[in-house]
Image (cartoon, rainbow, N blue to C red):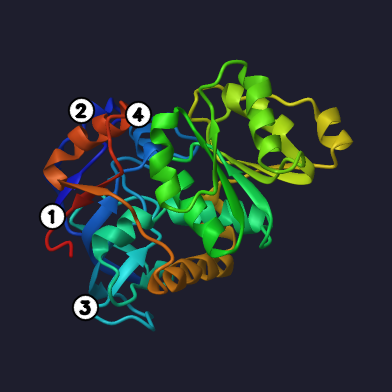
Amino acid sequence: MRAALVHDFCPIESLRVEDTADPVAGPGEVVVDVRATAINFVDTLVITGKYQFLPERPFAPGKLPTGVVSAIGPGVEGLRMGDRVLTLAEQGGYAEKVAVQAKDCFILPDGLSFTDAAAMSLAFDTAWFALCERGRAKAGETVLVLGATGSVGLASIQLAKAYGLRVLAGVSSPAKQDQVLAVGADGIVDLSRPNLRDSLRDQVREQTGGAGADIVIDPLGGDIFDAAIRAVAWRGRLVVVGFASGRIPTLKVNYVMLKNMEVSGLQVSDYRKRTPDEMAHCINEIFRLYAEGRLAPGKVTLFPLERVSEALVQLRDRRASGRLVLTMGEAS
C-alpha cells in the first residue's frame, strides 16, 4: 500500500508518501481500506514531535479515517466485509489501509459520504464533549464560542443550536461574521476591537442582559482566554480546548471562587481510550443529528494522498478554507 510514513520526526514539508506492507487484521481487529482522512492541526504537532502523545516510529499520521472494511480478524462480531465505517484510529489515516480495533469502528449512516464523515470527525466529537459533557449545556443557556470560524468552532455552533442554546460567536474580524451567522450563530463578539480585556466582556454582557455567558468554549488561549474569563456568568463554565493563539494562559483562582464558576479542560482522545461508551454515545448523537439535517460538515477541500505535505502546509499557514481532507480511492 501507499502511506505517508514518519520514520523520524521532521518538518511537515519533508513528509513523503512511500510503499509499505499492507496491515494484517489481528484478533479483534479489522482492516479498513481508507477512503478519506481529515487533516488536523494536531497532525502537524505529531509529525514534528511536538505533541504530548507520540506513537512509536515508523507510523502514518492521520486520526479517525473513514473507509470500507476489507479484512476481518479472529473474534470480530458486528462488522462485515464491505461495511462503510468511521474509525477511531489515533493514527494510520494517511495511508491506503489501516488496521483498527473493531470496537472502534462505527457504521456510517446512509447518505453520509466518506469525505463528509472525515471532515466532521475530531471537530464534532471535540465540540460535543466540550459542550455536553464538560459544559453540561442546557437548552436556553448562552454559549460563547471562541475561534468560531475554525472547525471546532463551527461544529460547536451547530451542536449548540441543535440542542436549543443561544450562541455568541467570537470572530477575529467583522468580515468573518457571515460564516458563523450562516450556521446559526445568534450574535457576534468582535475580538478585533480595542482593549480586548474589557471589550469582549462588554459585548457579551450587552447581548445577555448583563449576565454573561453560561458556557465559554475556548480553543484559543492567550489574551483571549484572559478576556473571556471575565465574561463568564455566575455559575458559568469555561472549557479549555486548546491554545491556538500560541500562549498558554494562567488564572488567579480567587476569581473562579468569587463567581462560583468552573474552568475545565478537554483532551478528547482520553474519552476514546477511557470511556468508550460515552464516545459511542457522542458519535451516535452526531450521526442522529446529521440524519435529521441539523448538522453539516461545511466547506471541504480535497487533496489526494500524494499531496499530503501541501495540505499540511496550507493548514499550518492558515491558508486553508474549510476542512482539508485527504482522499484515497473512491471517496464518495
- Residue denoted by label 2: 14
How far is the residue under mark 1 from the one under mark 4? 23 Å
Visible in this render: residue 30? yes
Q: Position of residue 182 (x, y in %)?
A: 40, 50
How far is the residue under mark 3 from the one under mark 2? 34 Å
Would you say 188 lies left or right of 103 here? right
Circle nearer the N terminus (3, 2) = 2
Q: Position of residue 77 (x, y in %)?
A: 38, 83
Residue shown at the point (50%, 51%) measured from the top left: 157
Q: What residue type is disc 4 on?
A: Thr
The label on residue 1 is 1
Q: What residue type is disc 2 on?
A: Ser
Quarter holding the C terminus is bottom left
Circle nearer the N terminus (2, 1) = 1
Q: Position of residue 57 (x, y in %)?
A: 32, 40
How far is the residue under mark 1 from the one under mark 3? 18 Å
The label on residue 82 is 3
Circle nearer the N terminus (4, 3) = 4
- At numbered mark 2, what does the secondary structure look like: helix, strand or loop? helix
How far is the residue under mark 4 from the one under mark 2? 10 Å
288 up-or-down from 116: above or below: below
- At numbered mark 1, what does the secondary structure look like: helix, strand or loop? loop
Q: Choose mark 2 or mark 1, whichever is in front.
A: 2
How far is the residue under mark 4 from the one under mark 3? 35 Å
The label on residue 48 is 4
Q: What residue type is disc 3 on?
A: Gly
Circle nearer the N terminus (4, 2) = 2
Q: Are marks 1 and 3 in contact (CB under 8 Å)?
A: no
Visible in this render: residue 25? no
